[in-house]
Amino acid sequence: MSGQLDIPRDLLKGWDVVVIDDEEDSLMVAEIILTEYGANLHTAVNGLDGLAVVRRVRPRFVISDVSMPVMDGWGFIYELRNDPELFETPAIALTAHAMLGDRERAIEAGFHNYLSKPLTPDTFIIDLLNLLMDIPSLADSLNI
């Protein structure tokens, strides 16, 4: 995991983070990496359950897949952005279909940015931190 050696292991200590994805592999990678850096991870397998988790834990940020059963990521972000208590919660889209225009579509829908699948242990934390640094409310909290 070269490149990650400079990142403090307690970088996300005490941060509640929600990851919403119906794919076990993605949840596992996110859990291993985020908890390694100190985050308190909360997961859900669809947008509806994810919304309930977000309401309960009030996370620092959310990572949500866009293609899921029950409620997809587009429905999730719509509900999140239209909830007066949650609309400022930073959210990052997670998609396996990283095509031209996906970033713009995700941002227009209310996501701050997006990560491409598959999540890999070697690049996940670096890619995530690059996105978090673009969110002023979170960048100020990161001591890197």
Image (tube, rainbow, N blue to C red):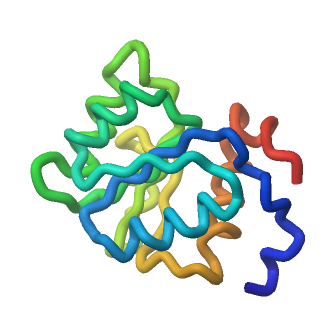
Residue 28 pos. (x, y %): 43, 70
Residue 62 at x, y percent in the picture: 47, 45
Image quadrant where residue 80 sits: top left
Q: Is residue 18 above or below residue 141?
A: below
Quick one: 112 or 99, which is closer to the camera? Answer: 112
Q: Which residue is drawn at the image coordinates 62% and 49% (left, top)?
A: 39
For the C terminus, the quadrant is: bottom right
Counting labels gives 0
**Which one is in front, 2 or 76?**
2
Residue name at image x 63 percent, y 78 percent = 123
Q: Quadrant of residue 25?
A: bottom left
Q: Is residue 64 above or below residue 118?
A: above
Q: From the top left corner, tell me how far across and down residue 124 is, in percent.
A: 59, 72
> Percent position (x, y) of residue 46?
22, 51
Whether residue 109 sits left or right of residue 89 in the image: it is left
Q: In the visual, does 79 lie left or right of 140?
A: left
Left or right: where 2 falls relative to 89: right
| Residue that appears at 61% across and 59% down | 35
